[in-house]
Amino acid sequence: MATMRDVAERAGVSIATVSFVVNNTKPVSAATRERIEAAMAELGFQRNVVARALASRRTRILAMAYPALEHRLGAAGMGFVTSAARRAAERGYHLVVWPVGNDAAELSDLVGQGLVDGVVLMEVLLRDARVDALVASRLPFAMIGRTENPAGLPHVDIDFDVTVEDALTYLHQLGHREVAFVTEGEPRATFRLYGPKVRAERAFERGCAERGLEALMVECEQHAAAGRETAREILARHPGTTAIMIMNEHAASGVLSGAIRSGVRVPDDMSLLSIVTTRDMGAMADPVLSIMRSPGEELGTLGVDLLIGQLEGEPMPEPRLLPCVLEPGESTAPAPGR
Amino acid sequence: MATMRDVAERAGVSIATVSFVVNNTKPVSAATRERIEAAMAELGFQRNVVARALASRRTRILAMAYPALEHRLGAAGMGFVTSAARRAAERGYHLVVWPVGNDAAELSDLVGQGLVDGVVLMEVLLRDARVDALVASRLPFAMIGRTENPAGLPHVDIDFDVTVEDALTYLHQLGHREVAFVTEGEPRATFRLYGPKVRAERAFERGCAERGLEALMVECEQHAAAGRETAREILARHPGTTAIMIMNEHAASGVLSGAIRSGVRVPDDMSLLSIVTTRDMGAMADPVLSIMRSPGEELGTLGVDLLIGQLEGEPMPEPRLLPCVLEPGESTAPAPGR
DNA sequence: CTGAAAGCGCTTACAG
DNA sequence: CTGAAAGCGCTTACAG
């Protein structure tokens, strides 16, 4: 590999001048610039990013930190990572992936190595030791998700209030008055601090109260069999239910087939709406599920933008909350008798 | 951040000696080692990985290169990345993700930056310019997947021969004599070079020939609606078919519901076997699909091991081919009349 | 507009 | 067992 020294010799200049044209950081006369560019082309020069990082104290590497044991991150998880990596590349950065535990020690350790200029933190909890560790480290970071009170901390997240409110409005306008909400259930204690679930539940309760509806919520493990069982349970205990809203991607198809197996027609007797999910997931069911699409890729892109913005001294961008967008499928219809 | 110089001063030694104990690279007397370790603890010293990389000419960063536009990589793609990142971390490496185009120029450019010690290349084609570029770069690499003739190139891949053979054996033993194979179809020209598809088709043809069966193969786009249409087509044109093998994760549930909508009972009238997929995908269908599980995470782990093996001068590990493993669900049964 | 030089924080022969 | 010193390949004041 040719170095700057090689280029400088060939062009008959100092390496400083080569650096100036490579980085376009100081004025250089057209003549010498041309000589240098010719030399670079002839030698196939590429600047060594490690040396640049050490000298400039900026590695131009970002980290994407996500929970190591997170199996919930399926297709959506890949969407975060690929969109974030793409955006980072577009802006001249690299993205490393850091599977980290929920304890902050591991993250602090990684940060201390000095490899990255900043961190994008995924799957943030309402109270999150990793966030505290990042604040303490003074390294720039951005959250995908947010703590209980994220004011002042750069973040992007799904707008659960708007998403749930839009979902309820949609179902309510279809005439549904008894709506069940199937959420994710998990034994792990930290799950009580899982923002998406907590925020969606609060929004559901509020939305139901405003409409004078009962807020029926059921937790369900994250697989199809549990979804089937949950559907049966709802039908047995709350036979008046005409619509089920689901925020549990892996159980949604199970809820559907559980209902169908119980002799319920979807959407004639029962509407199903799967929220915070992807078109692909909805399309795999039969009938195709109506969904509210999660803005997964947008969040990855925005998270990186928020971080790079800080690194490059742009005016601190506002936190962004993006709602999921309704994409009706075949599983929602007017309530029976309407 | 404390540097080695700080530690050395505090311990009253040279920075060389500090380096020796940090890296455990030369014998140091117990007494001085203790002083140094105490100093490190007091200062909270962490070695700067960028400086180490520059001095040692090893960054201990690996790249995972995958096709930028690849939307096929859903949950399985995340499995590759997370398992690879975890393995890299276990062995003291970082993993950067590189979304790259199919042309080799982008990859060569990234390699030339000197950021990584090696590359794990995903979604390798039978003839692949990126592989040629990596060979030319002389940078160590490992493939997940393989070219047409990968002898001498480190790789891990699914053993499509064994997988398809096992699938056929399973169906044949259940009495099925007319088996259709639904594969992925795509307009892109490079898809003709997509190894998994080509190898599976060859294996299917061979297996059918050996058993005196007709090798019925149908291409299908990668979504559920196309799967439904494909099921109808098979039923209409080949009414004797009693089993469908599917290597098209996103269409599998569609094939199932297409068959059911046509009045076919699964598995009584028709068996369905989805190969090279995940338990999660199979479980989302009703009835639960019998699958052959893709060893996605194992491939990610092995790919990293293969790469690190080269970097650390271990004897060149053999390429590894892993078969998918049969996990019967509710969608396969003896052929009708058996 | 251009260059000489210090320095980023380590590793690694080399010498003792 | 330990240290002085060169060097990894750049960037960046500073001087001219």
Image (tube, coloured by chain):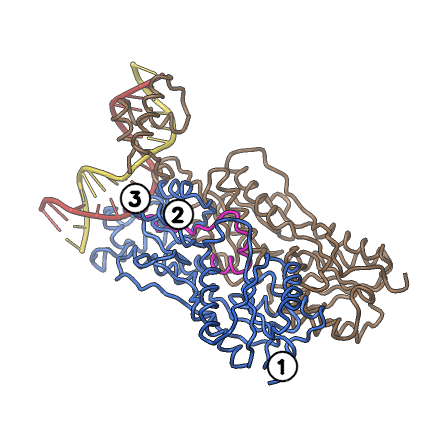
Chain colours: A brown, B blue, C red, D yellow
**Distance between mark 1 and mark 3 Cα atoms:** 78 Å
Q: Callout 2, which amino acid? A: Arg
The spot of residue A85 in percent (x, y) is 50, 46
Front of the two marks 2 and 3: 2
Residue A35, relative to residue B196: is it above or below?
above
Q: Are marks 2 and 1 on the same chain?
A: yes
Q: Are marks 2 and 3 on the same chain?
A: yes
**Quadrant housing residue B151:** bottom left
What residue lies at 75% left-to-right and 54% top-to-bottom? A328
Q: Quadrant of the N terminus of chain B?
A: top left
What residue lies at 65% left-to-right and 64% top-to-bottom? B233
Left or right: where does residue B34 sit relative to residue A153? left
Q: Quadrant of the C terminus of chain B?
A: bottom right
- Does residue B48 show up? no
Q: Earlier in the sequence, mark 2 or mark 3?
A: 3
Subunit that carries the residue with mark 2:
B
Disc 3 target residue: B5
Q: Callout 3, which amino acid? A: Arg
| Residue at disc 1, secondary structure | loop
Start and end of the magenta stretch?
Answer: B53-81
Disc 2 target residue: B130
What residue lies at 90% left-to-right and 64% top-to-bottom? A337
